Amino acid sequence: MDNTRPIGLFDSGFGGLTVMKEVARHLPAENLIYFGDTAHLPYGNKSPETVLQYALENASFLLEKNIKILIIPCHTACCHALKALQEKLPIPVIGVTEPGIELLKQSTHSWRVAILGTTSTINSGIYQSLILQQNPKATLFPIACPLFVPLVEEGLFQHQAARLIAEHYLQTLKDKQIDSALLACTHYPLLRPILEETLGPTVTLIEPAEICALQARELLAKANLLNLQTQRPRYEFFASDDPDKFRRFGPLFFGSEIARVNRCAIL
Ligand code: DGL
């Protein structure tokens, strides 16, 4: 087994770069390949069957790149395809759902919890059932926030419009005494300041990016798959549409410049 093989990640677009950033931070010797399926973005309003089909195609693209594990930062894809990919692929597959639940368990005391996600994620009921498996007495407030993704994509995540939309989506939570809100979408971390302001200081926002990276590190260590190279790791980026837009917007999520994005022909 060649441990210098890359870790693969795919998302519907560039939002999953928030997870890649944590993977790069906690696994600084690993080579990484990221695929953003920008031609099919957003996944959040698509049917489960369509998202599953895209996810299978994305995974086979990355398998051809000889990845050693697959990380799926996209919550919508995890809800509809994680299980299928874990069963089907010859390599370990990690998603963000289970790390998110793990972090939530550490954060909540009252088990009065909001779940914020795309329409497809919320309708899947996956997060609801995973939380109820942990505590059948949990009181859940799942809220689909379909306008959050386009607001972030347009760079309006600090704009007054985002504040108004957040107030509109979250107003029903005002008297519910939740203590945690799970950010079950790759784009929502960019809205953190506005969400904190809207939900108030008593609500902890749960973002699974870092714990997902830590779980990947643990998995690689256990499987003896850690890359021990001392040279600089190689990062490769692919997008199924508009690589230039990816290169311009990607740094917002990744936190560093992206020198080159390759166009990949999945359509
Ligand atoms: N990546 C998606 C998610 O985390 C958000 C963007 C989309 O709708 O495709 O659910």
Image (spheres, rainbow, N blue to C red):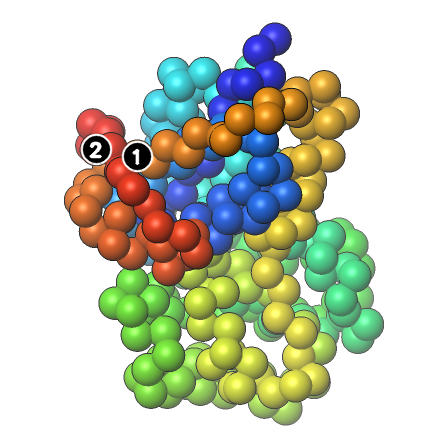
Indicate the position of residue 126 as horizontal and vertical percent values: 58, 51
In-front residue for pair 262/106: 262
Disc 2 marks a residue whose amino acid type is Arg
Q: CA distance from mark 2 to mark 1?
A: 6 Å
**Image mark for residue 101:** none
Q: Residues within 10 Å of mark 2 (few under 14, many from 20)?
A: some
Whether residue 229 is visible here, answered yes or no, is yes
Please report the residue visible at 50 percent of the width from the left and 31 percent of the height from the top: 232
Above-or-below relation of 150 to 43: below
Q: Dot 1, crowdedness within 10 Å: few (<14), some or many (≥20)?
A: many
Residue that extends furthest to the top in the rendered view of this protein: 1
Q: Are marks 2 and 1 in contact (CB under 8 Å)?
A: yes
The residue under label 2 is 263
Residue 104 place in picture, x, y as percent = 71, 61
Q: Give the SS element for disc 1.
A: strand
Residue, disc 1: 238
Amino acid type for the residue under numbered disc 1: Phe
Position above or below: 42 against 143 = above
Q: Is residue 267 left or right of residue 42?
A: left
Residue 204 vs residue 233: left or right? right
Q: Position of residue 240 (x, y in %)?
A: 24, 36
Query: Which mark is first along the chain, 1 or 2?
Result: 1
The response on whether ligand 1 sits within 8 Å of label 1 is no
Name the residue rendered at 59%, 23% in the picture.
229
Q: Where residue 94 sits in the image (x, y, percent)?
A: 59, 35
Q: Quadrant of residue 202?
A: bottom right
Residue 70 visible in image: no
